[in-house]
Amino acid sequence: MFFENQRGQTLWVYDVWVADTGPERYQGLSETEILPTDTGLLFVYDQEAADQAIVMREMHYTIDIVFIDGSGKVTAVRSAPPEPGVPNDELTHYTGRARWILEIPHGTAERHAIVPETSVRITGPTHSIDPKSTINTAHDST
């Protein structure tokens, strides 16, 4: 996944896991221990919607949530802290217009200047997420 400036120059590249089925999107990063630097989880939806939502169900760490529309433009960036012990029906819903939603380590969006209108190019092979075996065993490279 590539983030580009307005001249099409690549600013940052991320390796991402893909959640493109209902059960994968529901699971997301829940119950994981770490999300390594410059990696993320890309939620893929069949179509763009004005109110795609993410919650921090069973999350143990803060993340940045990047909402990306069907044209590949960032529409919103949210910082989402964990909500331990909060019942599912009371979790904060982070919403935005999106065809894709990218979850990345907290502070990454600010560090890499990912803001609304930033261009995103999604390319390369995709891999379904298995958070129990992939993310929990990954080591942060910084």
Image: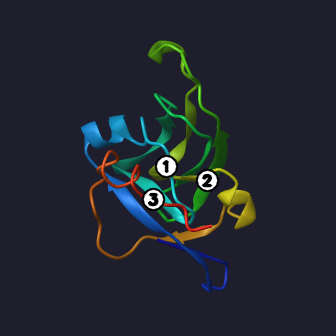
- Nearest to N terminus: mark 1 or mark 3: 3
Q: Residues within 10 Å of mark 3 (few under 14, many from 20)?
A: some
Of the numbered discs in the image, which one, if any, rests on residue 43? none
Q: Is residue 65 above or below residue 27?
A: below
Q: Are marks 2 and 1 in contact (CB under 8 Å)?
A: yes
Q: Pinpoint residue 95: horizontal percent, then vertical percent.
A: 56, 36
Query: What residue is at 70 percent from the left and 67 percent from the top?
Result: 112
The percent position of residue 61, horizontal first and vertical second, equals: 59, 39
Q: CA distance from mark 1 to mark 3?
A: 7 Å
Given the image, on which type of amino acid does mark 3 rest?
A: Gly
Binning the other alpha carbons within 10 Å of mark 1 as few (below 14), some (14 to 19) or many (20 upward) gives: many
Q: Secondary structure at mark 1?
A: strand
Q: Tell me the CA gap for discs 2 and 1.
A: 7 Å
Left or right of residue 76, residue 89 in this image:
left
Of marks 2 and 1, which one's residue comes earlier in the chain? 2
Q: Is residue 40 visible?
A: yes
Q: Viewer-proximal residue, 83 or 132?
A: 132
Query: In this figure, which residue is indicated by the disc labeled 2?
Result: 75
Identify the secondary structure beneath mark 3: loop
Separation of marks 3 and 2 at Cα, in angstroms: 10 Å
Structural crowding at the residue carrying mark 2, measured as other residues with C-alpha within 10 Å and reported as few (<14), some (14–19) or many (≥20): some
Residue to which mark 3 is pinned: 70
